[in-house]
C-alpha cells in the first residue's frame, strides 16, 4: 500500500509566486520521521528537512517552510517567492521505526517548474 | 567529507551482459540500501543491508543481487540485465538500523540504460 502520497504530479508557476507541495502519509507507528528531498535536473538528491513525529512545530528556512499536521497526516512544503532555481522534482518520504523492512518510503514526487 | 560514492554515474549496456554498480560509504554506517527511481513511482527499495553479511529484499528485488562483505561497500549486481532495468539507481546509508532514524546519506545516482 502506498504510504506516501504526493497527489500533485506536476506544478508550474511563474517566478515570485508562492507554491505549496502536498504530502500525505500513512503509518501505524507512533514514532516516525518525515523528509523532503529536492532532485534538481542534475539528478542528485538534496536533503531539505527531517522531522520526527513528536515535533509538530512548523519550520521555516529562508523561503522554505513546512507544515506538519498529525491530525491530517500531512507534511506540506511551501516555497515563498519562487525562483527559477527552485525548478526540480521534490520528494516527500517516510521512515518508520517498526516493521521488518527498514525502509524509507518515498512518494512519487512532484515536478515543479518555475518560469521566469 | 562524509559521503556515499557510487560508480559509474552513467552506464549504457546490452541485454544480458553482467554488470556491477559499486557503492561505498566512509561513515562506518551499519545500514545501506539500494533504490531505483522510475517516473511516477518515486524511489523503490531493491535490497538493504543492516550489517556485514546481512542483506534482505526490498520491494523490487527481482533481477538484482547484492553482497555486503565489508561494512563500507554494498555493490549492486545485475547478472543478466534487461531493458526494464533501465532506471536511475541510488545507494543510501545510515548510522541507525533504519534509513532515516539518523541522517540518511544518498549517493549521486547511477543512470543505467539497458539496450
Image (cartoon, rainbow, N blue to C red):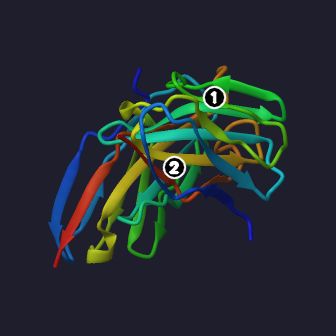
What chain is tagged by disc 2?
A: A
List x then y, in percent, for residue B105: 64, 55
What chain is tagged by disc 1?
A: B
- Which quadrant does the C terminus of chain A fall into? bottom left
In the image, residue A12 above or below residue B47:
below
Left or right for B52, reference A90: right
| Kind of element beneath mark 2 | strand
Q: Which mark is residue B65?
A: 1
Verify CB contact (< 8 Å) between mark 2 and mark 1.
no
Q: Which residue lies at the image location 60% right of the left edge and 56% below the top edge? A: B7
List x then y, in percent, for residue B3: 69, 62
For the residue pair B60 and A105, the one nearer the viewer reads as B60
Badge count: 2
* CA distance for labels 2 and 1: 28 Å
Give the labeled residue for mark 2: A35
Q: Which mark is residue A67?
A: none
Amino acid at each position: 500500500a502506498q504510504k506516501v502520497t504526493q497527489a500533485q504530479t506536476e506544478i508550474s508557476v511563474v517566478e515570485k509566486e508562492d507554491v505549496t507541495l502536498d504530502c500525505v502519509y500513512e503509518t501505524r507507528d507512533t514514532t516516525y520521521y518525515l523528509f523532503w528531498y529536492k532532485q534538481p535536473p542534475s539528478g542528485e538528491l538534496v536533503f531539505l528537512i527531517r522531522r520526527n513525529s513528536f515535533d509538530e512545530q512548523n519550520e521555516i528556512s529562508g523561503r522554505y517552510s513546512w507544515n506538519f499536521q498529525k491530525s491530517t497526516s500531512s507534511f506540506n512544503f511551501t516555497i515563498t517567492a519562487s525562483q527559477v532555481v527552485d525548478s526540480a522534482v521534490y520528494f516527500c518520504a517516510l521512515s518508520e521505526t517498526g516493521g521488518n523492512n527498514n525502509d524509507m518510503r518515498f512518494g512519487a514526487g512532484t515536478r515543479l517548474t518555475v518560469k521566469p | 567529507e562524509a559521503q556515499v560514492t557510487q560508480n559509474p554515474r552513467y552506464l549504457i549496456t546490452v541485454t544480458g551482459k553482467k554488470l556491477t554498480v559499486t557503492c561505498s560509504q566512509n561513515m562506518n554506517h551499519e545500514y545501506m540500501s539500494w533504490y531505483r527511481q522510475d517516473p511516477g513511482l518515486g524511489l523503490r527499495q531493491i535490497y538493504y543491508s543492516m550489517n556485514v553479511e546481512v542483506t534482505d529484499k526490498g520491494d523490487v528485488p527481482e533481477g538484482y543481487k547484492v553482497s555486503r562483505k565489508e561494512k563500507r561497500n554494498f555493490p549492486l549486481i545485475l547478472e543478466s540485465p534487461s531493458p526494464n532495468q533501465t532506471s536511475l539507481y541510488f545507494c543510501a546509508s545510515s548510522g541507525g538500523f533504519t534509513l532515516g532514524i539518523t541522517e540518511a546519506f544518498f549517493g549521486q545516482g547511477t543512470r543505467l540504460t539497458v539496450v
